[in-house]
Amino acid sequence: MDDIKTQGIAMPKLGLGTFRMQGDACRAAVESALALGYRHIDTAEMYGNEEAIGAAIAASRVPRGELHVTTKVWVDNLAPDAIRKAFDASLKKLRLDHIDLYLVHWPSRSMKLPAVLETLMKLKEAGRTRAIGVANFPTALMKVAVEEVRAPVACNQVEYHVMLDQTKLRKYLTPHNVPLVAYCPLAQGRVAADEQLARIGRKHNASAAQVALKWLLDQDGVAAIPKASRAESQKANLDALKVTLDDEDRKAIAALPKDRRCVNPGFGPDWD
């Protein structure tokens, strides 16, 4: 599997999302994914599953140096002391001695972004996280983080899939060498019912979901973290890497509606 090199780390382009996975079911899912060859696991303080993921990692015996683990600080904890406490708690639950990538999960309208990013930068300087980044940051906030604060932002994790256009954001991220990590890459299952994607899939002996996932993974500087709790789904997502889309396929995908946002909480930012 290809990696994305960013701010001194190598992040596998395909990872496992774990939102809404809990307890023993989460642990089993992560153990299954690691056994299949996944090496990029995405979690967050807010998911309430870091302990289960820590147990799965410990049970897997995959060498720590082969793993990429991302976790995130929740929107309620975006003050320096709160960030440090949240980080310590996440590290303990995950049973790790460092995090690979630590993100601001959502921006807050009341946060002091320079102080937030400086706190993350200190965690990086201390070797407690190998890299830092953000999630759900529109272009305006990315400009503050990258150009004003000059933070070493290793990624912006946002919703991105064949049904949601992120052209404007990518036009900012790409020249600044900030990868995009796509969550909800299958539009919370909506892609499976799309006839155009299914038609392209039949042409390649693949599913609509595999077509949608490969469309993302074919893009430079884009990683994807589909949630998959069943081993069959995890393997199907890995097998998407074998699909070869052509120009005709990409043209058909470009023609799909691109305005279906699945995740839009009331506290979210003003999207571009």
Image: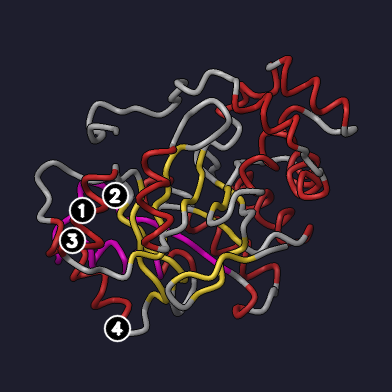
- Residues at badges 2 and 1 in contact (C-beta under 8 Å)? yes
Of circles 1 and 4, which is in front?
4
Helix, strand or loop under label 1: helix
Residue 125, disc? 4
Whole-number angstrom distance, CA of label 2 to CA of label 3:
10 Å
**Distance between the alpha carbons at the discs numbered 4 and 2:** 21 Å
Give the residue at mark 1: 77
Closer to the camera, 206 or 54?
A: 206
* Residue at 40%, 65% in the rendered image: 154
Among the two numbered marks 3 and 1 on one chain, the one whose residue lies closer to the N terminus: 1
Classify 8 as above or below 178.
below
Q: Which residue is mark 2?
A: 74
The magenta span reads 68-91
Circles 3 and 1, Cβ within 8 Å, touching? The answer is: yes
Q: Residue at x 41, y 52 (%)?
A: 44
Q: Amino acid at mark 1?
A: Asn
In 3D space, how far apart are the residues under numbered discs 3 and 1 (Cα atoms)?
Answer: 5 Å
Report how far apart the C-alphas of labels 1 and 4 lie in the structure. 20 Å
The residue tagged 3 is 82
Would you say 133 lies left or right of 197 here? left
Is 152 positioned to the left or the right of 60 in the image?
left
